[in-house]
């Protein structure tokens, strides 16, 4: 069985029941991102809407992505390469571990993983997952709570319980990336 095009395909054997078989086709290289056009989408977490649209509309996607990363590092090629390597490795792992009915980088867990990196600890209970990041040498913690949300397409669908308390940390993390450094909670 081959899928002729990319997408999410859900087969139901009985239309009165939500369950069925879901088949995903996000492309031949998935979960890796190899094309410059694919590299643009995850930049949504680091860019303003205006910057994002400008990058998306650029005539040469590779040049637009390269210029974005070089711009964050004052044209320091080595630092830009390091940022690209870390950022897109995180995108790869987000795709690998958190894909649902959408690519893993687009999920709440994928978003947090890309920006903050892997958590230091994960606590799982029935129906939820807590990601714990330690700050100031374990003196305080930043905890993200994800709740399982039932879906006919996947058993891997977790939604972040959003809190205004996250705003400051989010801004700090994005600013760190935009200042040419990989964010690490310190």
Image (tube, grey):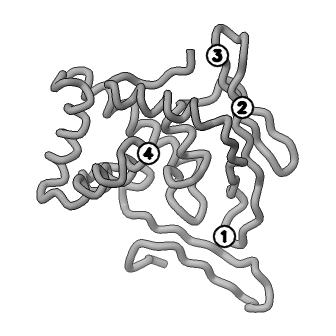
Q: Is residue 64 left or right of residue 104?
A: left
Q: Which residue is mark 1?
A: 153
**What label sits on residue 143 in the rendered view?**
2
Between marks 3 and 4, how big is the CA–CA gap?
Answer: 22 Å
Question: Among all residues in the image, which is located at the extreme top?
Answer: 137
Q: Tag 1's secondary structure? A: loop
Q: Which residue is mark 4?
A: 45
Q: Tag 4's secondary structure? A: helix
Q: Dividing the image into 4 quarters, which one contains the C terminus?
A: top right
Between marks 3 and 1, how big is the CA–CA gap?
Answer: 36 Å
Q: Tag 2's secondary structure? A: strand
Between marks 4 and 1, how big is the CA–CA gap?
Answer: 25 Å
Q: Residues within 10 Å of mark 1 (few under 14, many from 20)?
A: many
Q: Earlier in the sequence, mark 4 or mark 2?
A: 4
Q: Earlier in the sequence, mark 4 or mark 1?
A: 4
| Residue 70 position in % (x across, y down) | 20, 31
| Residue 184 position in % (x across, y down) | 51, 21
Q: Residues within 10 Å of mark 4 (few under 14, many from 20)?
A: some
Q: Tag 3's secondary structure? A: strand
């Amino acid at each position: 069985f081959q899928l002729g095009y990319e997408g999410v395909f859900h087969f139901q054997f009985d239309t009165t029941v939500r369950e069925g078989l879901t088949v995903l086709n996000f492309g031949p290289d998935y979960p890796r991102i190899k094309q410059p056009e694919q590299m643009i989408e995850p930049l949504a977490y680091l860019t303003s809407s205006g910057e994002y649209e400008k990058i998306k509309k650029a005539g040469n996607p590779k040049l637009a992505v390269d210029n974005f990363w070089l711009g964050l590092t004052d044209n320091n090629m080595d630092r830009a390469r390091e940022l690209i390597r870390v950022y897109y490795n995180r995108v790869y792992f987000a795709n690998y571990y958190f894909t649902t009915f959408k690519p893993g980088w687009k999920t709440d867990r994928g978003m947090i993983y890309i920006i903050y990196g892997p958590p230091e600890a994960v606590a799982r209970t029935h129906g939820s997952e807590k990601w714990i990041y330690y700050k100031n040498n374990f003196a305080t913690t930043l905890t993200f709570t994800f709740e399982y949300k039932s879906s006919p397409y996947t058993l891997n669908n977790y939604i972040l319980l959003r809190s205004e308390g996250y705003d400051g940390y989010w801004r700090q993390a994005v600013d760190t990336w935009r200042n040419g450094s990989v964010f690490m909670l310190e």
